[in-house]
Image: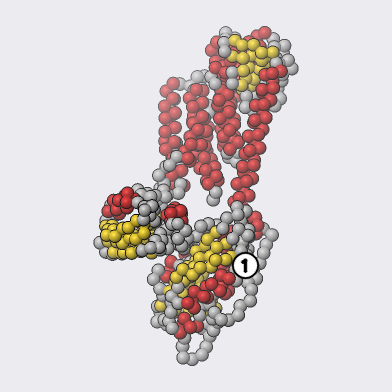
């Protein structure tokens, strides 16, 4: 999901909590100043909380049956030399929408938000024109603009707009006192903040309702200020009824009356709330904590909770990467972090060139139940490792579930030598027919070479290929294979893939693919290579038997065939 939508969702949830607190506990109270704080908190904290680096809650999840591989069976008598016709992929009119759905939604959302912002900017320009068109005078650092024919009096920032000929003397005094209260209490700042928030989070209905509640509460505050300075509250209420019949207004200014007449008169005549009820406003604290907790629960886990740039924890495993630019200081931090996990790091050999880049290294990791070692000479390439309680692994390619930012680090600091990394995990959205069609291509075409079956050869074939900006596949590179026949078989299938859709951003995508070839030994077990169960695709074949008959081979897909590690 795009980051923008995650932010909007989290901000909307926080806003909903604050608004529900307001209408359930504070809406009918006469503590208008406190209510103003509550409503402003709803806008401010719901916008800021999703941006704070809140620690994510970790949830332990058990694998479900949904992760079980899907099997497709094939005839065993086909092998790599068998001619195969081109793959027919079914196209639908909605495929382009599915491929670029996220981009389209983001563009549509931003377009509507920009349109709403433009409307408010036009309103500000209209206010500026009104200032130039009226008769202006200053008093007590407040600017008064006399505009004959104006529909209803209103204020914005430190400017009050009114028609001096439209009201009797008493009514005009009520109007000016009301608008002066808006100006002196800086209510326009509240209106601008709420308007900006609603433009950005326009899809959240609670944002608009909270804005309306804030507008009404500001009217209560202005009414309260006038009532406290007048000896005729009844006359002020008659002024509300008389002047409050005007039509639509500019939405970011404070009007003398804004179609809230009934509520305002009820609140003017309402008995003041007991001071003891102010304890309710302490409920803001648990609501704030609840909002922060919910955002922490929906936030992605920290990319680097191991305390060092080259280490990260994922699913109770400690992953790491070493690049040519890993410094002595980085190794020292890495050593301290590993020691906290009960793992000892030794580097008996470490050589660098004049630029400080590693050219040779002897890297050893020792735990209580396992140990592993990697020796690298020129040309030095980045390598990855992981450490668990009872096992560890190390090699030049990222392991399954290796954190994305470690792979990006290897690409950035590897001088172009990093291999086996998928640079864009969304590449399947551009495949004709999507992920299902991508799986179907492999299910229909992959064969277990007969020569490999007869020699009982099994293991993992790792390749990578590039998708050019125009969607053409090229640069198919075999990274590792148990034998040449298995590698050639996978390359043959990749060469038959249809062209991907063109990339609107014009970037070239590198895709890593691991296919595990296994042989059923006929005794309930399999002949397979190391780490075979973590491949993207699993092909199962059967050992040849003396008598001639057709035996099935099966091909299984894991849930994420585009997984980069």
Q: Compared to 367, does 496 lie above or below?
A: below
Q: Is residue 345 left or right of residue 107?
A: left
Q: Residue at x 43, y 69 (%)?
A: 533
Q: Is residue 102 visible?
A: yes
Give residue 523's position: percent from left, percent from top.
Answer: 40, 82
Q: Is residue 176 left or right of residue 46?
A: right
Q: Nearer the viewer, residue 558 or 392?
A: 392
- Residue 394 occupies quadrant: bottom left
Q: Nearer the viewer, residue 382 or 404?
A: 382
Q: Residue furthest left?
A: 368
Q: Nearer the viewer, residue 548 or 244?
A: 548
Give residue 215's position: percent from left, percent from top.
Answer: 58, 26
Q: Compared to 286, does 191 lie above or below?
A: above
Q: Compared to 28, does 505 lie above or below?
A: below
Give residue 275's position: percent from left, percent from top.
Answer: 44, 21
Q: Residue at x 54, y 42 (%)?
A: 8
Q: Compared to 207, does 169 lie above or below?
A: above
- Residue 60 occupies quadrant: bottom left
Q: Secondary structure at mark 1?
A: loop
Q: Nearer the viewer, residue 320 or 289?
A: 320
Question: Which quarter of the rendered picture does the C terminus lie within?
Answer: bottom left
Give residue 463's position: percent from left, percent from top.
Answer: 49, 68
Residue at image mark 1: 498
Q: Residue at x 61, y 61 (%)?
A: 471
Q: Is residue 95 left or right of residue 46?
A: right
Q: Is residue 72 visible?
A: no
Q: Is residue 45 left or right of residue 179?
A: left
The image's colour scheme reads secondary structure
All told, the count of numbered labels is: 1
Q: Residue at x 57, y 62 (%)?
A: 467
């Amino acid at each position: 999901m795009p980051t923008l939508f995650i932010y909007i969702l989290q901000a909307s949830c926080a806003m909903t909590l604050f608004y529900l607190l307001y209408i359930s506990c504070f809406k009918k109270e006469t503590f208008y100043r406190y209510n103003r704080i509550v409503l402003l908190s709803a806008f401010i904290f719901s916008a800021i909380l999703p941006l704070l680096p809140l620690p994510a809650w970790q949830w332990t999840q058990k694998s479900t049956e949904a992760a079980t591989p899907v099997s497709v069976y094939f005839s065993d008598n086909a092998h790599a030399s068998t001619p195969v016709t081109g793959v027919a992929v079914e196209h639908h009119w909605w495929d382009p929408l599915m491929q670029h759905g996220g981009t389209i939604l983001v563009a549509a959302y931003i377009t509507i938000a920009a349109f709403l912002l433009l409307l408010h900017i036009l309103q500000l320009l209209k206010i500026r024109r009104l200032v130039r068109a009226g008769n202006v005078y200053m008093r007590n650092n407040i600017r008064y603009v006399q505009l004959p024919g104006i529909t209803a009096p209103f204020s914005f920032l430190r400017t009050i707009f009114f028609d001096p000929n439209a009201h009797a003397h008493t009514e005009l005094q009520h109007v000016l006192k009301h608008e002066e209260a808006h100006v002196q209490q800086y209510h326009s700042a509240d209106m601008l903040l709420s308007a900006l928030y609603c433009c950005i989070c326009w899809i959240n209905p609670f944002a608009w309702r909270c804005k309306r509640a804030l507008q009404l509460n500001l009217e209560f505050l202005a009414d309260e200020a006038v009532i406290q300075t007048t000896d005729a509250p009844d006359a002020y209420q008659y002024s509300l009824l008389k002047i409050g019949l005007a039509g639509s207004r500019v939405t970011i200014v404070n009007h003398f009356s804004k179609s809230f007449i009934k509520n305002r008169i009820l609140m003017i005549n309402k008995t003041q709330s007991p001071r003891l009820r102010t304890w309710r406003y302490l409920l803001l604290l648990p609501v704030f904590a609840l909002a922060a907790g919910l955002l922490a629960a929906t936030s992605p886990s920290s990319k680097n909770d191991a305390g060092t740039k080259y280490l990260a924890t994922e699913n109770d495993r400690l992953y790491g990467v070493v690049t040519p630019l890993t410094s002595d200081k980085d190794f020292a931090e890495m050593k301290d972090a590993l020691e906290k996990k009960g793992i000892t790091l030794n580097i008996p050999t470490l050589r660098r060139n004049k630029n400080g880049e590693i050219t040779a290294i002897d890297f050893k990791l020792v735990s209580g139940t396992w140990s592993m070692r990697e020796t690298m000479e020129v040309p030095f390439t980045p390598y990855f490792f992981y450490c668990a309680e009872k096992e560890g692994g190390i090699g030049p390619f990222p392991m399954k579930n290796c954190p994305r930012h470690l792979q990006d680090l290897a690409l950035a600091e590897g001088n172009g030598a990093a291999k086996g990394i998928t640079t864009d995990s969304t590449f399947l959205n551009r495949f004709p027919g999507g992920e299902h069609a991508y799986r179907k291509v492999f299910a229909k075409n992959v064969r277990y070479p007969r020569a490999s079956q007869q020699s009982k050869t099994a293991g993992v074939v790792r390749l990578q290929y590039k998708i050019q900006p125009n969607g053409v596949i090229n640069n198919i590179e075999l990274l590792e294979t148990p034998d040449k026949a298995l590698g050639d078989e996978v390359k043959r299938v990749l060469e038959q893939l249809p062209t991907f859709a063109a990339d609107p951003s014009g970037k070239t995508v590198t895709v890593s693919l691991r296919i595990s070839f296994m042989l059923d030994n006929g005794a309930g077990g399999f002949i397979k290579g190391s780490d075979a169960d973590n491949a993207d695709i699993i092909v199962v074949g059967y050992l040849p038997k003396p008598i001639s008959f057709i035996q099935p081979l099966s091909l299984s897909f894991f849930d994420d065939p585009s997984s980069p590690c």
